[in-house]
Amino acid sequence: MRILVTGAAGFLGSHLARYLISKGHSVVGIDNFITGNIENIEDLFGTAKFSFLKYDVTNHLYVPGKLDAVLHFASPASPIDYLKYPIPTLKVGALGTHKALGLAKEKNAVFMIASTSEVYGDPLINPQHEGYWGNVNPIGPRGVYDEAKRYAEALTMAYHRYHKMPVRILRIFNTYGPNMRLKDGRAVPNFMMQALKGKPITVYGDGSQTRSLCYVSDLVNGIYRLLMSGENDPVNIGNPHEISLLELAETIKRLAGGRSKIIFKPLPQDDPKVRRPDITRAIKLLKWQPRVALEEGLKKTIVYFKAKMK
């Protein structure tokens, strides 16, 4: 297949592009580098199955030639990014999704939206299943990301229902691994950077809030299985193993071999207290579940961070 990936220079987009090529597909990558990094994909340049366009997908999107799938992964995803770029975040979720859907329709291609567990907001149920509508503050600081993704899902389903387009709605839970930016701002990069530098490890709140962390290779395999399925309704992809942020900080500190102190700061507004996917649908429909244990994935990520810090 010939597949378009928006946000191809980002953390997930770069792994996905590489995985698709390993499966024999051709990839057209698009990124405007607002948060993506060309170093994530520089090894793909010059290969026959990869082409790249520096472009903002909120503008009119035209790609010559056939496309079999359009995978819309472009968006700031870290709180520090969407707080810094609130309007671009809303635009790429709304206008970018609209342009990407229009391109997929023109090409008779499958469309996939990279949605997020943030559509569940600060959830009132745990774990979160796809039928849960969420608990989101639309006017809070995180609303620019949460509502952009919720709108993107609504628009995707509108195209599916009205134009009979095949669509895939991927709800991504917390993911980590190589190609994350060192100053990404999320828990794993923060803790690793602080531990490796011997600085105090900052935990927000009392550290009892939970996350469920999926290693990137597992996530990308799940994405691919969803793409190749015939499933149009949302599917959670993530690791259901739940861990408190305090325990995560202590684990990273131990694996990094550091002696950092753990300090506590106030919890940011609307920060989710729990986050755990119900992956029953992924297991049933995609025959998928994560394989990489947390410590194994963290060790691989620490190796990457150490190399990038040199």
Image (cartoon, helix red, strand yellow):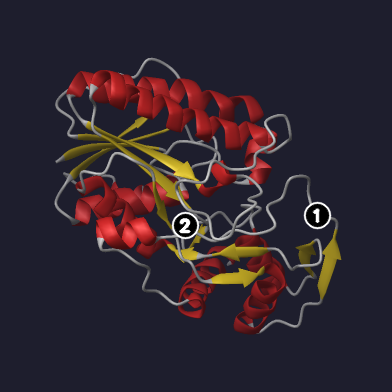
| Residue at horizontal 72 percent and vertical 29 percent from the top | 139
User: Tag 2: residue type?
Assistant: Asn
* Displayed quadrant of residue 63: top left
Mark 1 is surrounded, within 10 Å at the Cα level, by few (under 14), some (14 to 19) or many (20 or more) other residues, namely some
- Can residue 57 be seen at all in this image of the molecule? no
Indicate left or right for 36 with 6 as reference: right
Numbered circle sitting on residue 14: none
Dot 2 lies on which element?
loop
Residue 155 sits above or below residue 231 on the image = above
Q: Mark 2 to mark 1: distance in Å?
A: 27 Å
In front: label 2 or label 1: 1
For residue 208, side relative to residue 223 (left or right): right
Q: According to the image, label 1 marks what residue?
A: 267
Task: Give the vertical position of 165 relative to 248 (above or below).
Answer: above
Task: Name the residue that disc number 2 marks.
Answer: 179
Residue 140, image x, y percentages: 74, 34
Residue 80 visible in the picture: yes
User: What residue do we see at 77% from left, 65% from top?
Assistant: 203
